[in-house]
Image (cartoon, grey):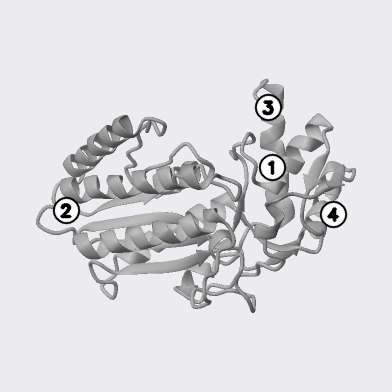
Amino acid sequence: MIGAGGLLGKAVVREFQSRGETVLTSRIPWSEPDAALAAFRAGAECLRDAAGSGPWTIAWCAGAGVTGTSPEALEAELSLLAEALGVFEEVLCTGGGQNGAFFLASSAGGVYAGSSAPPFTEHSPVQPLAPYGFAKLRAEATVADFARRAGVRAFIGRVSNLYGPGQNLRKPQGLISVFAKAHLTGAPVSVYVSLDTLRDYLFVDDASRLVADGLDRLVLPDIHPGETVVKILASQRADTIGNLIGACRAIFKRRPLIVLGASPFAKAQAHDLRLKSVVWPELDAHPVTPLAVGINNTVQEVQRLALSGQL
């Protein structure tokens, strides 16, 4: 597991462990590329030794980039991903990678931001509006090339607006967590898009189940070594920011303090990001967590952090 300390990574680890799977994690010194590559090599060797001649899976849920991240920082992330894949190929794919599976967490919002005619499916033309979205597409292409070259099956999940307990509250993303934090601190929340903006909010436990189910589906006989499958991971239920504010008000017992403002990043935000997955639709048969339940769980986690002095 790469990125086990993040919102999605933590949840994916929990999901696999609940299914009785052995999960290996490691700390990656992201700011030190040489040390990071050494950690990737050590982790790959440990995975090889643990798997023996049996199947292995790597889930890449890492990535510090957001819409406003600089192109230079995004380029550094992409370079490290490409180098890590080279290490995985060298260590794990000697003689072919037919037993290997790789998951990459991508961004539906990033790659469809400028697309037209929602709801967007896996067959919709992609059109990023910011360097972040273009970087996500390059990461997807890098993984697909690795899969073809190494004979590894790859699963790319284009994740919608992810939220839930465990979100990094220092990161400038995750409107639901921002609302929860503001509710406890009394600070106003700046919103830079119109309140009728449509987003697909996916609770993190629903996302981790989709990741695990997708990796299980990936190894069935109809998916061949070297093939890459792209699937949208979403609730497939759209809510306006106005609806989100209303749901928060019902839980907080008061309306969040909202400040409508302007931002240079607003032009990179789509007005309508409705999503519908048409790939492996059987994976979407499970009911998703209701928005109110997910918000309440997120608020409880933020309250716990506040009481422990970690907010």
Disc 2 and disc 4 in contact, CB within 8 angstroms: no
Of helix, strand and loop, which one carries label 2?
loop
Q: Residue at x 61, y 47 (%)?
A: 68
Q: Residue 97 occupies which quadrant of the picture? A: bottom left
Could you give the CA–CA distance between mark 1 and mark 4, rounded to whole angstroms?
15 Å
Q: Which residue is mark 1?
A: 177
Q: Which residue is mark 4?
A: 246
In the picture, the quarter occupied by the N terminus is top left
Looking at the rendered structure, the kind of residue marked 1 is: Ser
Q: Which residue is mark 3?
A: 311
In the picture, the quarter occupied by the C terminus is top right
Of helix, strand and loop, which one carries label 4?
helix
Q: Residues within 10 Å of mark 1 (few under 14, many from 20)?
A: many
> Can I make out residue 155 in this image?
yes
Q: Residue 148 occupies which quadrant of the picture? A: bottom left
Could you give the CA–CA distance between mark 2 and mark 1, rounded to whole angstroms?
40 Å
Could you give the CA–CA distance between mark 3 and mark 2, rounded to whole angstroms?
43 Å
> Which mark, by number, is residue 93?
2
